[in-house]
Image: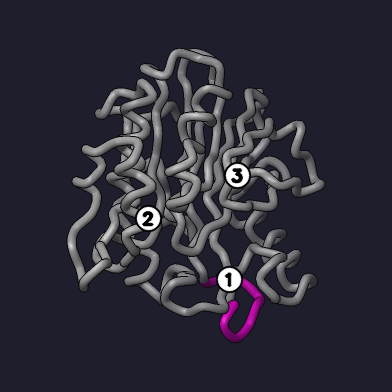
Amino acid sequence: MTDGGLIDAAADWDVPSFVHAGYTLRSGGVSAGCYSSLNLALHVGDERSLVLQNRSIAVQRFSLPAEPVYVTQVHGTRVLTGEEAGADAPECDALVTGKSGLPLAIMTADCLPVLFFDPASRKIAAAHAGWRGLAAGVLEITIEAMGTDPSGIRAWLGPRIGSLRFEVGEEVRNAFLDADSSASDAFRPARPGHFLCSLAALAVRRLTGAGLWRDHISDCGLCTYSDPARFFSYRRDGKTGRGAAFIWTDPA
């Protein structure tokens, strides 16, 4: 499951060998303190020079074929192609590309990263799915942007805050139940007015509702909050770094 500082998605999903994907562990970088040590985010208060070193380390350690496309994530639903995003880090929460050798990156520290591959078109995509993005339809919009038959798409759910740790209020639960009453299965009562929420269960409902087959959805099952040695967690630590989910295909 873990290989050289990367949670290997290949251990969980059925994709060809030319598809590479995974999620970074927090160790092996140069950042210090609450950002220790492979923080890949420029927006969390870490020193820019250290973050850029960490990004270079990631390229080398994980044998990425190029510098990944990073974006400025805002818990929205905007989807861009990797080519449109380029190196400018525009505001969006999902990326799609049919270009081989172009790594896509989604940074998280409790939100759910979802990676996609379509065997027919060989397109890949990556989405940032916190509860706001899930409720707003970021996964469905990403699938639509891939422009292919969703029944063939494979999806991988990466590390995120687990259902035993993610407590939310009634407003979060209602955001989902107002659109889909059956989404109540993803919530369990906690203290009065609060619920334990499964981001993974909500994502699966959204993905299957968009046309993916259930057996084409793989879940690593890892909780960022419960594993401080391996993962950053905003809910656990407050000021902290970000890991990243990467996906790319071998250059043609």
Which sits earlier in the primary sequence, circle 3 or circle 2? 3
Pointer 2 residue: 172
Q: Nearer the viewer, residue 73 or 175?
A: 175
Query: Does 133 lie within the magenta span?
Result: no
Q: Which residue is disc 1 drawn over?
A: 241
Left or right: 138 in relation to 93: left
| Cα–Cα gap, marks 2 and 1 | 25 Å
**Neighbour class for label 2 at 10 Å: few (<14), some, many (≥20)?**
some
For mark 2, give the secondary structure. helix
Q: How many discs mark residues in the rendered view? A: 3
The residue labelled by disc 3 is: 93
Name the image quarter holding residue 168.
Answer: bottom left
Asked if 225 appears above or below 245 in the picture, the reply is below
What secondary structure is the stretch in magenta mostly built from? Answer: loop
Magenta region, residue range: 27-35
Amino acid type shown at disc 1: Gly
Q: CA separation, marks 1 and 3?
A: 18 Å
